[in-house]
Image (cartoon, rainbow, N blue to C red):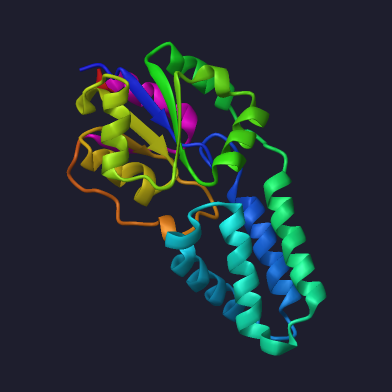
Amino acid sequence: MPIDLICLDADDTLWHNMRHFQAAQDALQSMLRPFADAAITRATLDACEARNLRLYGYGAKGFTLSMIETATQLAGDTLPTRMVVDILDAGRALLAHPVALLDGVEATLDRLADMARLVLVTKGDLMHQEAKLAASGLGDRFAGIEIVSDKTAATFRRVFAAHGVAAARAAMAGDSMRSDVLPALEAGGWAAYIPQEGAWAHEAAAEPVGTPRYARLERLADLPDWIAAIA
């Protein structure tokens, strides 16, 4: 059975992303060293992020607010005003970093486009994701762009239906087990997991077992051969 629709994640699937968040986190740990060691800062920030997701959603702006909240928790009333300014600067750097494509992305997208329609399915802040897509130069390769607040099975069912494709003829590929793979499989589609170094712990989940609709790939360049093998 051929695949008629290929959905692709953006951050850390097409271009580098988490390394910029890691740089901001490292900067926060350095700022807060007088108040807490790095492990405590990391744990506090992780807890703030998880708690704030339902309020702020995904992306650099919510992450910046969580960094400020982490600083207020660890430094208390002794938090220097200058540190808040520095955290905001780190957040602005997250929003302004250059978009660097992963190796071989353009050639891989060209191969995939010859096989099926391509749709970008990414989550995060709308303005930031639009800006990164524009900077990437990849937008024209996609038949559709879906920037969503979260990725669930309902999200993928809607995307498949919007493009007039049965779930059994649709595939999703990305670096997040929780957001890219599991909900696409639940929606009835195929899913490829392409892990990247430095993945956010919140996106981790157990790999599916016993389903032929799932594959773990070493790199995005392996996706076209897997799609071809499905047919």
Q: Is residue 123 left or right of residue 162?
A: right
The answer to whether residue 190 is seen in the rendering is no
As drawn, is 67 to the left or to the right of 229?
Answer: right
x, y percent for residue 204: 39, 57
Q: Nearer the viewer, residue 214 or 83?
A: 83
**Residue depicted at 48% across the width and 32% down the height:** 220
- Against 159, residue 116 (above or below) is above
- Residue 226 among those drawn in magenta: yes
Q: Residue at 55% of width from left, 55% of height from top?
A: 198
Q: Horizontal and vertical percent for residue 75? A: 68, 85
Name the quarter where the C terminus is drawn: top left
Q: How many marks?
A: 0
Q: Quadrant of residue 14?
A: top right
Relative to 224, is 97 on the left or the right?
right
Q: Toward which corner of the image does residue 215 lie, by quadrant?
A: top left
Q: Viewed as shown, does residue 161 lie left or right of 46?
A: left
**Residue extent of the magenta highlight:** 213-229
- State the residue lying farthest toward the right: 82
Vertical comparison of 120 with 180: above or below: above
- The answer to whether one can see residue 51 in this image is yes
Nearer to the camera, 67 or 34: 67
* Percent coordinates x, y for residue 183 in the rendering: 29, 44
